[in-house]
Amino acid sequence: MRSDTSGAIILFDGVCNFCNASVQFILKRDASGYFHFTSQQGSAGQQLLHHHGVPSSLDSIVLIEDGKLYYQSDAALRICKHLNGMWKLVAWLLLIPKPIRNFFYAIIAKHRYRWFGKSDSCMLPKPEHRSRFLDESER
């Protein structure tokens, strides 16, 4: 696993169609290349989750930024803060109490496979984005 990654790392469910679409969405709106990615199922993702003591039962996107771990709505909204365009404004939702935000996040997380589908394997990044994927950069 690379240790020289600057910026933040997003750990996503690599077999979730909604999560893969979210990664593509972020890539299009992160022109500065602030975010790097790894699937939670990949070796880099597994190492990071273990290193940070994330329980395997956690059903959430994970953001590692400045050595801190964020998940559920905190991760999603902190990601929005770094995206181009009007998406930065979505971060104001951080003012809503976390239990309320996470209630709605949990509904989407619980039903994401049923609503958006599931892949048999993790997505392969486009060649122009491979350097932003931790597991891909090791190959």
Image (tube, rainbow, N blue to C red):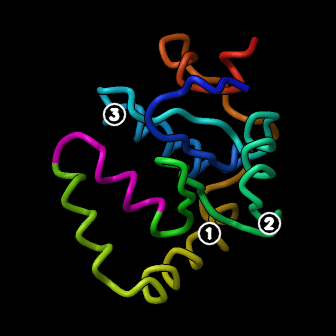
Point out the frontmost of discs 3 and 2.
2
Mark 1–mark 2 Cα distance, whole angstroms, equals 16 Å
SS label for mark 2: loop
The part of the image, by quadrant, that contains residue 69 is bottom right
Q: Is residue 129 above or below residue 85?
A: above
Q: Main secondary structure of the magenta part?
A: helix
Of residues 29 and 34, the one nearer the viewer is 34
* In magenta stretch: residue 79: yes
- Which residue position holds label 1? 109
Q: Which amino acid, by three-letter code, is at mark 3?
A: Asp
| Residue 62 point in image, percent of width and height | 59, 55
**Position of residue 25 in the picture relative to residue 137 (left or right):** left
Q: Residues within 10 Å of mark 1 (few under 14, many from 20)?
A: some
**What label does residue 30 carry, if any?**
3
Q: Disc 2 marks which residue? A: 55
Callout in the foreground (1, 2): 2
Q: Residues in magenta?
A: 75-85
Q: Earlier in the sequence, mark 3 or mark 1?
A: 3
Q: Identity of the amino acid at label 1?
A: Ala
Q: Quadrant of the C terminus?
A: top right
Image vertical order of residue 19 relative to residue 71, above or below? above
Residue drawn at x 56%, y 71% is 108
Q: Measuring 30% from the left and 27% from the top, which residue is drawn there?
A: 31
Q: Is residue 68 left or right of residue 81?
A: right
